Amino acid sequence: MNHSIDYIYRSVIQNLESGVLVINNEGIILIVNPSALKHLNIKSDVLSPGENIFNHTELYPFAEIYKELLEKQEPISRRKITLDTEKETILGLTSSLIIEETKIMGAVFLFTDLTQIKKLQHEAEINKQLAHIGTLTASIVHEFRNPLGVISGMTEFLMQKMADKPEIVNNLKLILKETEQLNVLVNQFLSFAKPQDIFIHKETTEFVIEKAITICSHIIKKYSATIEIDTIPKKLQFIFADADKLSTAIANLIRNAIEVQLEQDKKWVRISIDSDNEYIIIRVEDEGPGLPAKIKKHELLKPFFTMKKGGTGLGLSIVQRIVMGHHGWVNFHNRQPKGAIFEIGIPLKPEIDFQDTQSPKSIT
C-alpha cells in the first residue's frame, strides 16, 4: 500500500506543470521533475539528482533562497526571481524547509515560468501609456507639421531665387536638411502614438537592411559614419516580416548607434544576421560608451526614457512595438572591448498563416 502511495506521489510530481526541485540539507538534489528542466532551461547534467545546487552558478538563485530559508526559518511565498540565462527568465517561486521532528531535512522549491505573463503585462502597460498620449501627440504633430511645411516650402523657393549665389544656396540646403530631420522626429512621435498594421510577407533580408540604411542616409552622411554589413548567411537570406515596419525598427537602432558616438571622431556601426534556429537575429553593434551596468531592459525600452542629450526616448520604444507586432523580441548587452550590441529576434516562421497576410495584425 505504501509503495502504491509513493508511486502516486512521484507520478503527480512528474506530471505537474509547475517545476519541482527537492534538495537535502546539504543542497544535494533529490527530486527534479520535467517541468523544472523546461522552465529553467538548464542542462540535465547540471539539474539532476545527486548534483549540489551550491556547485553550479546556474542554480545560484536557489542556493541563495535556501540560505534565506535556513536563516529566517519561514516559508517563501510567490517570490519573483530572475535567472541570468541567454534569454532572461522570470520565475514565480514558493519554497519551504522540509522538517521532521525539528530536524531540517532539506527544502522544496515549487516554481512556474512568468516570463510570458510579464511580457504581456509590459505590453499592456505600453498600450495604456499610448492611450493617454495618443490624442495629445496627434495634435502636437499637426501643430509642428504646419510650420515645418512652410519652412521647407519657403526654403525651396529661396533656393530657386538665389540659384546664382552658391554660398546662400548652401546655407539654404542646410536649413532644408535640418527641417527634414525635424520631420523624422515628428514622424517618430506619430509612429509611436498611432496603431500600426503589420503585414507579414516573405522578403529578402538584404532588402530590409538596405531600406533601413536608406532611411538613415541623412544622419550617416551628416556624421560620416561607417556602416559595415556582414555577409548574410545563405539560409537566412529570406525573412517573413513587414519590410516597411521592420526596416524602420532597424533604422532606429542604426540612428541610435550613430548618435551615441557623436562625441567620438569615428562613428562605426556593424550590422550582422544570425539565427538561434527559432528566430532570425538582426544585430546592430557600435563602438560607443556602452550601456550602464545596472540598466534594466524595461527601463531602456520605456517610452520617453533616454540617456542621450536631447533624445526623445521614442526610438527604442518604437523598435519594441514593431518587433512585438512580429511576435519577436529585443535584447541588448555591452560588447568588447567597448560599445553596445542591440538585437532584434524575428520568428523564422510566421505565427500566422502566410496566406492570410492580406488581413493585417494591428498593434496598439
Image: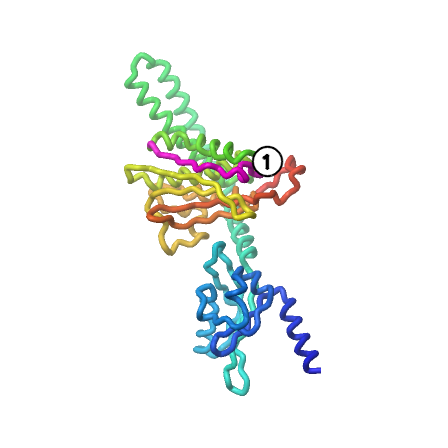
- Quadrant of residue 200 within the rendered picture: top right
Residue in the picture at 65% in, 75% down: 9
Q: Nearer the viewer, residue 232 or 303?
A: 232
Q: Is residue 296 magenta?
A: no
Give the magenta-colored segment's residue range. Answer: 224-240
Residue in the picture at 53% in, 43% down: 280
Residue in the picture at 38% in, 41% down: 257
Q: Position of residue 94 (x, y in %)?
A: 54, 70
Q: Position of residue 338 (x, y in %)?
A: 33, 47
Task: Give the secondary structure at mark 1.
Answer: strand
Q: Position of residue 144 (x, y in %)?
A: 43, 32
* Amino acid type indicated by mark 1: Lys
* Extreme-bottom residue of the structure: 101
Q: Position of residue 330 (x, y in %)?
A: 48, 47
Q: Is residue 351 left or right of residue 156?
A: right
Q: Nearer the viewer, residue 147 or 30?
A: 30
Q: Is residue 34 above or below residue 356?
A: below
Q: Is residue 235 magenta?
A: yes
Q: Is residue 9 left or right of residue 312?
A: right
In the rendered image, the quadrant that contains the C terminus is top right
Q: Is residue 109 above or below residue 196?
A: below
Q: Is residue 300 above or below residue 264?
A: below
Q: Residues within 10 Å of mark 1 (few under 14, many from 20)?
A: some
Q: Is residue 144 visible?
A: no
- Residue ID for mark 1: 202
Q: Nearer the viewer, residue 154 or 32?
A: 32
